[in-house]
Image (spheres, rainbow, N blue to C red):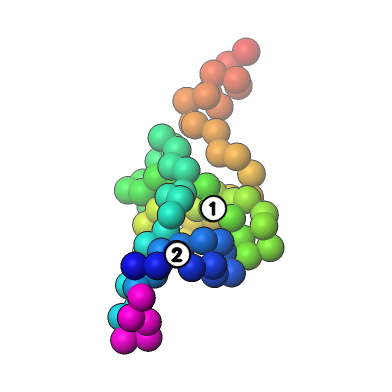
């Protein structure tokens, strides 16, 4: 395994590339405790686009393609705000 630079940042890749294409991320995406509102099975994770913008998406991608461009808020927090 060797440290490599890709278009989305640093990652660890196999030293026998292209025979072996195994890669691992150095920094795992920040996972929130908020369940995905679309599929209900995954959780929202913070990701960075190739342009450097931050967004949140379901960790079950590509099975669930939910994406939100702003910081997610838990549903029970929204209910508390609307009751005031």
x and y, in percent, of residue 32 in the image: 45, 38
Number of on-image labels: 2
Q: Residue under circle 1?
A: 47
Can residue 77 be seen at all in this image of the molecule? yes
Q: Quadrant of residue 15?
A: bottom left
Is residue 52 shown left or right of residue 57? right
Q: Dot 2 lies on which element? A: strand
Is residue 54 shown left or right of residue 57? right
Q: Residues within 10 Å of mark 1 (few under 14, many from 20)?
A: some
Task: Look at the numbered discs 2 and 1 and tell me whether their residues touch, using CB distance below 8 Å.
Answer: no
The residues bearing labels 2 and 1 have C-alpha atoms spaced at a distance of: 20 Å
Q: Residue under circle 2?
A: 3
Name the front one of labels 2 and 1: 2
Residue drawn at 49 percent across, 31 percent down: 75
Is residue 53 within the magenta segment? no
Q: Is residue 11 above or below residue 47?
A: below
Q: Quadrant of the C terminus?
A: top right
Is residue 61 shown left or right of residue 52? left
x and y, in percent, of residue 57 in the image: 50, 52
Which residue in the rendered view is the most extreme toward the bottom? Answer: 19
Is residue 16 within the magenta segment? yes
Q: Out of 28 and 34, give the one closest to the viewer.
A: 28
Q: Residues within 10 Å of mark 2 (few under 14, many from 20)?
A: some
Q: Dot 1 lies on which element? A: strand
Q: Give the number of the disc on residue 17.
A: none
Can residue 36 be seen at all in this image of the molecule? no
> What range of the chain is rendered magenta?
15-19
Q: Out of 44 and 21, give the one closest to the viewer.
A: 21
């Amino acid at each position: 395994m060797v440290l490599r630079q890709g278009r989305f940042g640093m990652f660890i890749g196999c030293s026998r590339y292209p025979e072996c294409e195994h890669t691992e991320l150095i920094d795992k995406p920040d996972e929130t405790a908020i369940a995905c509102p679309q599929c209900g099975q995954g959780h929202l994770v913070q990701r960075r686009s190739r342009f450097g913008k931050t967004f949140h998406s379901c960790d079950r991608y590509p099975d669930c393609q939910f994406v939100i461009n702003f910081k997610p808020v838990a549903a029970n927090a929204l209910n508390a705000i609307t009751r005031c």
